[in-house]
Image (cartoon, helix red, strand yellow):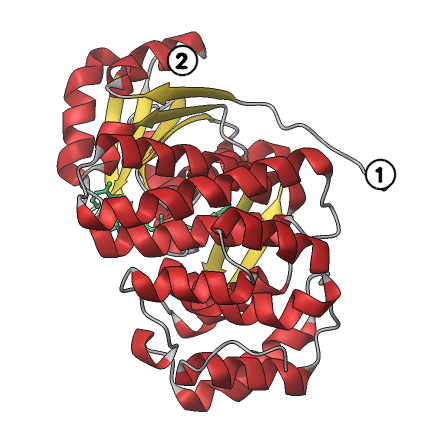
Amino acid sequence: MQAFTYNALPGRVVFGSGTLSQAAAEVQALGCRRALILSTHQQRDTAQDLKARMGSAAAGLFSGAVMHTPVAITEQALAASRDCGADCVVSLGGGSTIGLGKAIALRTGLAQIVIPTTYAGSEATPILGETRDGLKTTQRSADILPEVILYDVDLTLSLPPALSVTSGMNAIAHAVEALYTADANPVISLMAEDGIRALAGALPAIVTDPRNVEARSDALYGAWLCGVCLGNAGMALHHKLCHILGGSFDLPHSETHTVLLPHVAAYNAGAAPEAMRRAARALGAGNAAEGLARLASSLGAPTSLRQIGMPQEGLDRAAELATQSPYWNPRKVERAQIRALLQNAWDGRTPAPL
Ligand code: NAD
């Protein structure tokens, strides 16, 4: 057994079907009385419904959350929080809404209850990515980690199949990287393998029948495990590239993860053989990069950066940004190889070790 360090993160998790009805009780259990509910515009109706159910425990609703947590939107939400005298936030939605709740908590110290409706995993991490002037910066702090996660499988039944697939691949990316980051450890590796296995098994069933509650439960459970992996073991090259393409080129988050993951797995394969063996085993594949590419394409996910709006002329700048202040990665991050990786991903070619 290799030496390792494991930092368990605090947090209460409530998982099940119909758990939304427990939101008001969770607010009270935190010693709070006036929650500001957060959502995107698209999920405003669900958030309104939650507000009605929570009665006097809900003081207000802000439905302006958007992707990549722009600071200007956070300022609007902070004003809404002050206006209604909020003493906690309840974030109902995917990573965008949860990111907004984290940004508020970081600035105010308000407690957070998060009700995730995608598989992005932000709910389980002390990480916040914010965008200012077209640049996404990421920070970690204990103040960012939500106090309570309320998983209600029912809320995920409406997640469109295409987004379910890319969001699930986003979660799998957390687990794959957790297997080889500098902070990898045996406990998190167990979670990573099981998270990949749960999602890889559930996603095909969800595409066939998006209202398959059993498959939705497995996927949400897998998403939690993968989120814990991200929160505990951190990130490497794959997440760095996704942050650059999302923050500086405004590419859609989960689709970007989906396209890049097999390419980064191929790039890192030689430097992290044990991690790749475990990822492949969880995918039921002989090779992790191939297994990831096959899973995504068999579920109809995008397979090229070109398809998801990346301008080819931006690849040079993206490669430059990736090598400026790289995250730790098992294989050295070199500009020429990263440029080639991005070109392969842009063209939608077979992932290659380069
Ligand atoms: P999202 O939150 O942007 O959601 C995408 C769209 O789907 C939104 O319109 C949303 O309202 C809608 N939606 C969500 N759940 C739905 C449901 N069940 N039914 C119908 N519609 C639904 O997407 P995301 O991929 O979850 O989050 C992406 C953002 O999260 C990015 O900004 C990313 O950087 C961030 N993120 C952060 C972390 C972290 O640890 N800090 C981890 C993962 C993702």
Determine whether the residue tagged by mark 2 lies in a helix, strand or loop. loop
Front residue of 235/165: it is 165
Which quarter of the image is occupied by the C terminus? Answer: bottom right
Figure quadrant of residue 28: top left
Q: Name the residue tied to disc 2.
A: 32
Front residue of 83/200: it is 200
Counting from the top left corner in percent of width and height, residue 39 is at: 27, 40
Counting from the top left corner in percent of width and height, residue 221 is at: 41, 32
Q: CA distance from mark 2 to mark 1?
A: 45 Å
Q: Name the residue tied to disc 1.
A: 1
Front residue of 298/313: it is 298
Name the residue at 41% across, 37% down.
101
Mark 2 surroundings: few (<14), some (14-19) or many (≥20) residues within 10 A: some
The image's mark for residue 183 is none
User: Is 297 positioned to the left or the right of 320 in the image?
Assistant: left
Give the mark, 2 or 1, whose residue is nearer the N terminus.
1
